[in-house]
Amino acid sequence: MLIQRDYYLQKLINRRENGRIKVITGIRRCGKSVLLFDLFTNYLKNSAVKDDQIITLKLDTAINARYRNPLELDRYIREKVKDSSRQYFVLIDEIQEVMDIPNPWLPRVKSSIGFVDVLLGLLDMGNLDVYVTGSNSKMLSSDIITEFKDRGDEIHVEPFTYKEFYGAFTGDKGRVWQEYTTYGGLPRILSEKTDADKSKYLRDLLRKTYLTDVLERNHLQKDITVLDDLLNVVACSVGSLTNPRKLERTFASVKHKEISDSTISNYLDYFCEAYLIHKACQYDIKGRKYIGSPMKYYFTDIGLRNAQLNFRQQEETHIMENVLYNELCARGLNVDVGVVEYNYKDADDRSKRTKLEVDFVANLGNGRCYIQSAFAIPDREKRLQEINSLCRIKDSYSKIVVVRESIKPWYDENGIYYIGIEDFLLTELDKLVAQM
């Protein structure tokens, strides 16, 4: 079953023939290839583009391994362009598979040729519209972006949102939340029939695809146990503030392993580069500045988090917070973890200073909203505890409390909006804010 992803498809359509290289990024198996080779290709064909004007190549298959050599890739594409007066569309999957090779024309100079050189050369032909996918953010490092000379355009793809998953789910809709928060939103989950098959698929992906990719790309074959242990620690502490130094102490006390904080920091970066996890930085709302440490880590797909722990730890509070974070990212928002500092007097009339958390500060352009993930607010005392940080923010941006249960959305006396998690996930954010 081909599931439409109109949000991402429209992003590609809007960038059609804009003179830039469209780079579609995201974790492996999140649907990038389907988006490009099925949905976008169908759009092109329905727009009267002929088959021979669409040049496709999947680089993660053995049959196309030769084209991981940049010179072979360049030759292949150019041979497909038969008519310089016609517009061609070049679609390449997993472009990071292209290796860097020594420049054969400058043997005495330390110079190399890679996919950036190939893509820029194709763009200079004038009649090629270039689209590529990639599963590792190193391909968009600052150095490569500089080399693109402002000619790269990123479209980042996430696994299915709850709304996409809900629309494609063919079983009892009352079970969608349970399915989604257990097995996540990777597209193939919808076609697996049994719990055992879904669990095996996710565990195999972690071991045979994601961890293998991190190991091979960063030459860490000897460190697989450490990487696995670190991913376990991150999975257990989703939604908790941490930093490499704290994780170093955890390894020493719990795992009885001496791993330096710098090594842990590098490994966390490798997971982020593979889009396996996201890092959320702390933002001082009143001071209007970022706090370097600690930070929070969230799994790009909650099903992978659960699979990493063999589906043993199913804390709904942490899972709900992770799902909310992913939803905000998928809606194109920049998401930080908020901190509100304030002064108060203790029982002995001594001045004290403390910090309160705001789960998410979500920004888009000049717009912003503050979101608190509160699994349950059974009484007034608990509600006041949850909104303490929000009440201390004096600006006029929207403030939202999201709860697990299905409730009729309402406002309190502070203008804070309360809504159930499923209603929140099924309502577009601009429509939600407009209602407030």
Image (cartoon, grey):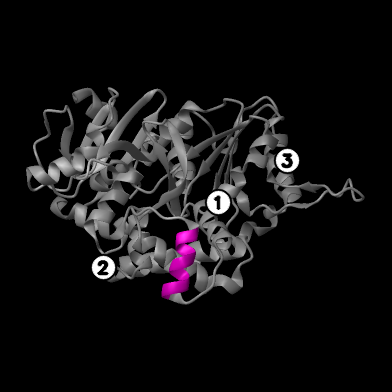
Asked whether, in this view, residue 369 is left or right of residue 141, the answer is: left
Q: Which mark is residue 195?
A: 2
Characterize the local packing of mark 2: few (<14), some (14-19) or many (20 or more) Cα atoms within 10 angstroms. few
Characterize the local packing of mark 3: few (<14), some (14-19) or many (20 or more) Cα atoms within 10 angstroms. some
Q: Residue furthest right?
A: 108
Q: Nearer the viewer, mark 1 or mark 3?
A: 1
Asked whether, in this view, residue 248 is left or right of residue 419, the answer is: right
- Residue ID for mark 1: 136
Q: Is residue 318 above or below residue 389?
A: below
- Specify whether residue 252 is painted magenta: yes
Visible in this render: residue 339? yes
- Residue ID for mark 3: 117
Q: Are marks 1 and 3 in contact (CB under 8 Å)?
A: no
- Tell which of 98 and 84 is nearer to you: 98
Amino acid tagged 3: Asp
Q: How many marks overall?
A: 3
Question: In the image, what residue occupies the spot 23% across and 23% down?
Answer: 434
Q: Which mark is residue 323?
A: none
| Quarter of the image where one finds residue 188 | bottom left
Q: Earlier in the sequence, mark 2 or mark 3?
A: 3
Characterize the local packing of mark 1: few (<14), some (14-19) or many (20 or more) Cα atoms within 10 angstroms. many
Name the spot of residue 226 as percent of width and height, x first: 51, 71
Name the spot of residue 48 as percent of width and height, x first: 49, 28
